[in-house]
């Protein structure tokens, strides 16, 4: 676990929840993507959300009939999540911890789910191996993450400004007093696919949502992404895989 990532979320959780104003639902990422088909029927399923944050997706999973457990490295984020669950009268267990060292036994869940978190995970291989361990045979891992091409492209000129192969740890300096820097981890699509395969998963589906119509666009919970650029490059990568 990257301690800078944890410190950042502990410091910015209140601000993030207020400004992002995320609704209860399956929030795949930056853009408003209406696609829950990958999750299937959740009635009676045991579901683990990896990096549940403020619990908006967690609550939506529970409302679809699943028994849900959420884990997050940020105590502040979990505080927002438990308050949301109380507000919606939902019984959901949460745990504070890292997705690379899950505090659960083997073969406990039917689905591991995650949206927009893996860019903050330093060891994606360890995360996938842990997800595989806690899933029952035939269990599924479904997640979304920022598409690696989008952040490399200038929003105005639409030109590629950075190398797709410049992977690894990246630091965005926050000059505000007492604010930890933002740390993310860049990966190629092949890095994600190969890490899944190494962990024992079979990739069932990759989705790269976009739009051929720049006017047909709504901002998602993390804010606005330029619609003209989104018509050329996907903002989100969605992956579904099965533990065999």
Image (cartoon, rainbow, N blue to C red):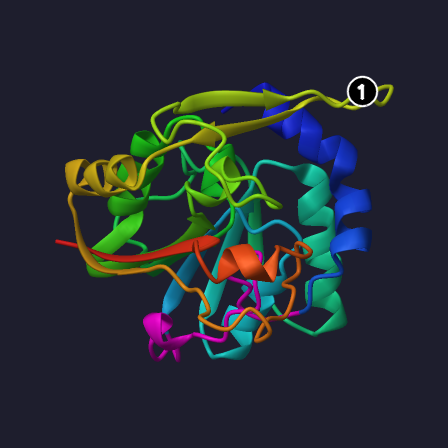
Residue 126 percent location from the top left of the image: 32, 31
Vertical arrangement, residue 190 with respect to residue 8, above or below: below
Q: Mark 1 points at which residue?
A: 175
Between 160 and 53, the one nearer to me in the picture: 160
Q: Main secondary structure of the magenta part?
A: loop
Q: Which residue is drawn at 39% across and 43% down?
A: 104
Q: Residue furthest right?
A: 177
Whether the magenta-drawn stretch holds residue 36 is answered as yes
The residue carrying pointer 1 sits among few (fewer than 14), some (14 to 19) or many (20 or more) residues within 10 Å by Cα, namely: few
Q: Can residue 92 be seen in this view?
A: no
- Residue 108: in magenta span: no
Residue 234 in percent (x, y) is at 43, 56
Q: Can residue 4 be seen in this view?
A: yes
Q: Give the range drawn in magenta.
A: 24-44
Q: How many marks?
A: 1
Residue 228: which quarter of the image?
Answer: bottom right
Residue 29 rendering spot, x and y as whole percentages: 54, 57
| Residue 19 in the image: above or below residue 178 | below
* Element type at mark 1: loop
Residue closest to the eye, 34 or 43:
34
What residue is at 42 percent from the left and 74 percent from the top?
36
Out of 119 and 153, give the one closest to the viewer.
153
* Quadrant of the image occupied by residue 46: bottom left
Q: Nearer the viewer, residue 4 or 28?
A: 28
Q: Residue at x 59, y 21 (%)?
A: 171
Indicate left or right for 228 with 77 as reference.
left
View extreme (left): residue: 244
List x then y, in percent, for residue 65: 47, 79
Q: Residue at x 38, y 27 (%)?
A: 123
Name the side, left or right, on which 144 lies relative to 51.
left
């Amino acid at each position: 676990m990257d301690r800078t990532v944890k410190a950042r979320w502990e410091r910015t959780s209140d601000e993030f929840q207020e400004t992002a104003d995320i609704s209860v639902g399956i929030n795949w990422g930056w853009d408003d993507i209406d696609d829950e088909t990958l999750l299937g029927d959740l009635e009676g399923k045991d579901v683990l959300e990896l990096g549940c944050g403020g619990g908006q997706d967690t609550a939506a999973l529970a409302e679809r009939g699943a028994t849900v457990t959420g884990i997050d490295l940020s105590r502040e984020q979990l505080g927002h999540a438990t308050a949301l669950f109380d507000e919606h009268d939902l019984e959901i267990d949460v745990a504070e911890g890292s997705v690379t060292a899950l505090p659960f036994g083997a073969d406990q869940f039917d689905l591991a789910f995650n949206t927009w978190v893996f860019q903050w995970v330093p060891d994606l291989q360890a995360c996938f191996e842990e997800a595989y361990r806690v899933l029952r045979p035939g269990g599924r891992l479904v997640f979304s993450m920022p598409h690696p091409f989008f952040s490399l492209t200038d929003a105005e000129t639409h030109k590629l400004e950075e190398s797709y192969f410049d992977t690894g740890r990246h630091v965005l300096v926050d000059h505000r007093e007492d604010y930890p820097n933002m740390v993310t981890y860049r990966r190629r699509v092949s890095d994600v696919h190969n890490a899944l395969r190494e962990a024992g998963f079979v990739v069932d589906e990759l989705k790269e949502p976009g739009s051929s119509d720049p006017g047909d666009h709504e901002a998602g919970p993390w804010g606005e992404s330029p619609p003209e650029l989104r018509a050329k490059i996907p903002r989100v990568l969605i992956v579904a895989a099965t533990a065999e």
